[in-house]
Image (cartoon, rainbow, N blue to C red):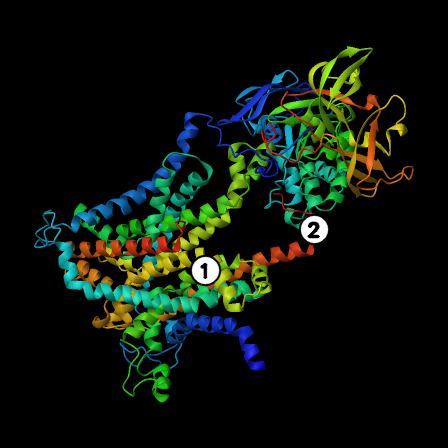
């Protein structure tokens, strides 16, 4: 009996810091107050404001002012008008995610398990792109994929691309840009969980008659699941809301929902429509995230 | 600070600590003489570390007092007490050099010239020349000695040691035990040492308190506790005992008569903690001697018969298990002194002992024989 | 046979290096373009080697103004977010209080919300409250999205810190304040510095949220975005390359320091006697 009972670590359960006085009990709230207030006022309240704006009378304008008419119809209206962009957002982000997984998993695995003493250097290489401006890097893809560039020339020469075929201003360019921009967000958490993977587990699996493929499927993959889930979310959330790649590397034919929201707020100044689209985007992402988390069986993301 | 107050004994008076519904330390009263080496011995979660932390001021008692001489230090913040601690994992400051670690306490008390003192202290713990290193560059044993120097340099009235040797391997632990004892004799400070290692407690301390479930089960010199334990818990926590359930039927001629499993035994009244009612008759395994038949038992000795079910040769001794007629397996340790022949497994044997080596403890009526050692068990699991 | 065996052993590493090449390619291009004299304002192709861009990085003065503005905003946002976030991290790790899970959600949500939604919702708030947009609204927005990252970074460092070190300090006559100053702060500082660097890079590079709250104020990313339509001056690549070089230098220096410490540890011999306490 006694053998089965859990043995403590020699320490009593960690005690709460003794509540010496009322001032001490207030301390955590004082520490939290400025930061929490900032987040509430500039993150929480705006979301409410956005929700309200999405229900404004769509016939108003910024100059005449908006009337709150609880115009729920804004939602079906924008959905009807912009469903292709919505679908495209999730389609491109999904495609980029698949690509990123195919590229990112071997990369994370190699750094975590195969790189030995080079592991820190390789890790820096993964983060290095983020050292410089996101926009400048995306513009660099314009040069790489340019019609006069070496890459297009090569692909035309080997007939992978028609003589007048292009890479820039195509869906391919947008998906490539999305994959590139958010790949480090996928690789880093994946690396963190693969790094903790004990190499002896794979040896044990092989010892127990698992082929390399089986060892990967039965041991490596399940154990890297937390990193995979976190990385996938960190990739997918910004990718589906992105509009910079579509703008810089694509054409209006590749526009994603972000481009529509951007122009609704900044060009057309149609706040009710923009707000409704923003909210739909957020709802769609939350639905995808929670659906995914439920399937992945993890509630712990952070 | 250490020298302001008159020296004196460390006294704990009705000290109690509860964490929610869990009582870690239960109405503990204790006096630890000045300059003594005192060990608090117990299994994980028995409250020994909590007791230590209350003396250090790192935990506030739910009720009760901590007194140093005549001074009540119960509510004093840790940095106001003339008490220092050697922590379980040393807790050396990783960003400071060894020198600065050792000098830390002196500097906090505003002492400017610390060089001589630190150098002297480092040489006391045989770490001359290590001052410029960082804790991570030292081995476990060296870190342990830095932790000791860092505490001792303040000349506390009481030095608390929280499992200070727990992270060391066996050989180094033995070496450090001797070292610690040497230093304690040298500096003459009261040492309160918390450990779960009975051998460590017995080796080092003048006085041992065996704790269980937040209370002290027995307090005394190591040999006294071992030879005449106060409770069944102590009998099987400190070493191992064969405890036979029986009924005491009163004193006669200086002996207490006991009936156990249909046989009559007797124990000297001076080694009995109960004279009537349910008792445990206890004999240590090394006090039992195995012979082939009852006629080999010398006069004045008592015995039980059984069958040898196991014999483990462990070098200095051979440890036998003897199953008695009523099914209990007794432990018998036979020293490999070359004077007695080995007994074969499966053969019938008689285990006898001198009644002066037996002891008698009160027993819960529901309790039966107990012959196996208490493993490192959590509070309450045994009751 | 031997080739296939060699490939089977190394294909993961080969793929990894190729992917790293994919990640590095745009940076090389940016560095290359910083030495380019473009044939026309709207051209993104290599034309002719020149050092002019590096000699006169501020040839287009509004770009340099934008860089300065980004640095100003980045600096202020970093200071404010680091202070707010560090305080929150201390509260979360060191104290027990009611409403902890609510606070955790409040910190987590901004990291999980698309920047687009944060940007537009802040815009909606500022417009309805009649706040003129510009430098200060950008700063407010940047602090908002940096705080969460600071909290997470500092929290990780704090949580990994042994509480017993502080107890040991108190045991060795250090008062609460001395303990904080001599022990806690030095040990948490690397986490705070890392958080501040992260906050600065997030702020400096932010485009989406800034875009909705900038009014007529132009930060460096805003400038690049606007220039992408009108024609990019090659000096943008100079800034991009310089940023990269500075960041790389910082990382290099810090890892050099780390390596020296590690080497010193090795020289001291393995801590063979130290078993990890449970």
Residue nearer the viewer, A18 or B113: A18
**Whether residue C214 is visible:** no
Q: Is residue A146 left or right of residue C27?
A: left
Q: Residue at 27% of width from left, 60% of height from top?
A: C218
Query: In the visual, does C277 lie left or right of A179?
Result: right
State the mark number for residue A232: none
Of badges 2 and 1, the one in the foreground is 1
Specify the quadrant of the image occupied by residue A251.
Answer: bottom left
Residue, x 52% and y 64% (percent of image)? Answer: A215
- Give the distance between the C-alpha atoms of the residues marked 2 and 1, in whole angstroms: 32 Å
Binning the other alpha carbons within 10 Å of mark 2 as few (below 14), some (14 to 19) or many (20 upward) gives few
Left or right relative to C153: residue A97: left
Check the picture and name the quadrant holding the N terminus of chain B.
Answer: top right
Of residue B54 and residue B200, the one placed in the foreground of this image is B200
Q: Position of residue B15 (x, y in %)?
A: 58, 21
Q: Name the subunit of mark 1.
A: A
Residue A80: x %, y % from top left: 14, 62
What residue is pinned by disc 2? C272
Placement of the C terminus of chain B among the 4 image quadrants: top right
Look at the numbered disc 2 and give the secondary structure of its residue. Answer: loop
Left/right of residue A231 with respect to residue B151 in the rendered view: left
Label 1: state its secondary structure. helix
Which chain's residue wears label 2?
C
Tell me whether the residue at label 2 lies in contact with that at label 1, contact meaning CB atoms closer than 8 angstroms. no
Q: Can you identify the residue that label 1 sits on?
A: A190
Report how many numbered discs are placed on residues in the image. 2
* Quarter of image, res A130: bottom left
- In the displayed structure, would residue A174 be above or below residue A163? above
Is C58 placed above or below B365 here? Answer: below
């Amino acid at each position: 009996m006694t053998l089965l009972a859990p043995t403590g670590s020699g320490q009593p359960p960690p005690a709460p810091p003794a509540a010496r006085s009322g001032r001490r009990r207030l301390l955590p709230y004082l520490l939290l107050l400025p930061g929490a207030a900032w987040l509430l006022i500039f993150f929480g309240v705006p979301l409410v404001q956005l929700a309200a704006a999405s229900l404004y009378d769509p016939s108003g304008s910024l100059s005449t002012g908006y009337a709150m008419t609880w115009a729920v119809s804004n939602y079906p209206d924008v959905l009807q008008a912009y469903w292709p962009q919505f679908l495209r957002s999730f389609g491109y982000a999904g495609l980029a995610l698949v690509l990123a997984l195919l590229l990112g998993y071997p990369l994370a695995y190699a750094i975590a398990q195969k790189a030995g003493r080079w592991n820190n250097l390789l890790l820096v290489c993964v983060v290095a792109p983020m050292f410089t401006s996101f926009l400048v890097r995306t513009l660099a893809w314009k040069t790489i994929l340019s019609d006069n560039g070496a890459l297009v020339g090569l692909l035309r020469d080997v007939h992978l691309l028609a003589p007048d075929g292009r890479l820039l201003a195509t869906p391919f360019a947008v998906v490539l840009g999305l994959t590139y921009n958010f790949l480090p967000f996928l690789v880093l958490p994946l690396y963190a969980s693969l790094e903790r993977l004990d190499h002896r587990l794979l040896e044990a699996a092989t010892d127990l008659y698992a082929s390399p493929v089986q060892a990967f499927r039965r041991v490596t993959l399940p154990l890297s699941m937390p990193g995979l889930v976190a990385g996938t979310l960190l990739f997918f959330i910004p990718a589906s809301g992105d509009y910079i790649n579509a703008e810089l590397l694509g054409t209006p034919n590749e526009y994603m929902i972000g481009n529509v929201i951007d122009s609704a707020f900044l060009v057309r100044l149609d706040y009710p429509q923009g707000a409704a689209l923003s909210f739909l985007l957020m709802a769609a992402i939350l639905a995808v995230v929670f659906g995914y988390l439920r399937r992945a069986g993890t509630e712990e993301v952070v | 600070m250490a020298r302001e107050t008159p020296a004196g004994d460390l006294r704990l008076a009705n000290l109690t600590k509860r964490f929610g519904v869990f009582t870690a330390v239960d109405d503990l009263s204790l006096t630890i003489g000045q300059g003594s080496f005192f060990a608090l011995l117990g299994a994980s979660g028995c409250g020994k570390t909590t007791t230590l932390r209350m003396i250090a001021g790192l935990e506030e008692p739910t009720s009760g007092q901590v007194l140093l001489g005549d001074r009540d230090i119960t509510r004093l913040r840790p940095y106001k007490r003339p008490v220092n601690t050697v922590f379980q994992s040393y807790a050396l400051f990783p960003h400071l050099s060894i020198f600065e670690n050792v000098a830390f306490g002196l500097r906090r008390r505003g002492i400017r010239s610390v060089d001589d003192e630190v150098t002297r202290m480092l040489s006391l713990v045989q770490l001359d020349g290590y001052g410029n290193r960082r804790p991570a560059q030292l081995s476990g044993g060296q870190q342990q000695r830095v932790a000791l120097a860092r505490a001792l340099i303040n000349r506390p009235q009481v030095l608390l040691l929280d499992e200070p040797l727990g992270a060391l391997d066996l050989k180094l632990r033995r070496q450090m035990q001797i070292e610690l004892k040497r230093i304690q004799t040298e500096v003459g400070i009261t040492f309160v040492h918390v450990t779960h290692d009975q051998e460590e407690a017995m080796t080092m301390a003048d006085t041992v308190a065996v704790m269980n479930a937040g209370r002290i089960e027995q307090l005394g010199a190591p040999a006294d506790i071992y030879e005449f334990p106060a409770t069944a818990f102590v009998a099987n926590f400190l070493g191992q005992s064969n405890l036979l359930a029986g009924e005491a039927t009163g004193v006669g001629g200086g002996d207490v008569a006991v009936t156990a499993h249909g046989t009559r035994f007797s124990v000297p009244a001076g080694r009995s903690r109960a004279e009537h009612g349910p008792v445990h008759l206890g004999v240590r395994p090394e006090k039992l001697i195995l012979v082939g038949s009852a006629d080999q038992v010398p006069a004045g000795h008592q015995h039980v018969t059984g069958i040898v079910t196991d014999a483990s040769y462990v070098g200095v001794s051979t440890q036998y298990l003897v199953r008695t007629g009523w099914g209990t397996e007794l432990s018998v340790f036979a020293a490999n002194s070359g004077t007695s022949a080995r007994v074969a497994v499966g053969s019938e044997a008689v285990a006898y002992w001198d009644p002066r080596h037996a002891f008698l403890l009160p027993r819960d009526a529901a309790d039966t024989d107990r012959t196996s050692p208490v493993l490192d068990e959590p509070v309450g699991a045994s009751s | 046979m031997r080739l296939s065996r060699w490939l089977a052993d190394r294909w993961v590493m080969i793929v990894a290096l190729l992917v790293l090449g994919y990640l590095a390619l745009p940076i090389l291009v940016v560095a290359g373009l910083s030495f380019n004299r473009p044939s026309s304002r709207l051209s993104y192709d290599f034309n002719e080697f020149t050092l002019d861009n590096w000699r006169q990085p501020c040839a287009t003065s509004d770009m340099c103004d934008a860089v300065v503005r980004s640095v100003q905003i980045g600096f202020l946002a970093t200071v404010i977010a680091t202070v707010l976030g560090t305080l929150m991290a201390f509260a979360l790790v060191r104290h027990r209080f009611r409403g902890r899970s609510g606070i955790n959600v409040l910190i987590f949500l901004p990291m999980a919300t698309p920047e687009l939604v944060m940007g537009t919702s802040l815009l909606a708030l500022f417009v309805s409250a009649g706040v003129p947009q510009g430098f200060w609204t950008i700063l407010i927005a940047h602090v908002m999205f940096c705080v969460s990252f600071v909290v997470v970074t500092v929290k990780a460092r704090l949580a990994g810190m042994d509480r017993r070190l502080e107890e040991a300090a108190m045991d060795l006559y250090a008062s609460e304040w001395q303990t904080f100053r001599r022990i806690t702060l030095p040990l948490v500082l690397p986490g705070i510095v890392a958080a501040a660097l992260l906050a600065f890079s997030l702020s400096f590079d932010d485009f989406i949220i800034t875009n909705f709250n900038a009014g007529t104020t132009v930060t460096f990313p805003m400038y690049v975005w606007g220039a992408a339509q009108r024609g990019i001056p090659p000096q943008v690549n100079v800034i991009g390359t310089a940023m990269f070089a500075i960041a790389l230098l910082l990382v290099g220096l810090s890892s050099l320091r780390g390596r020296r410490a590690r080497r010193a540890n090795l020289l001291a011999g393995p801590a063979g006697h130290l078993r990890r306490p449970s």
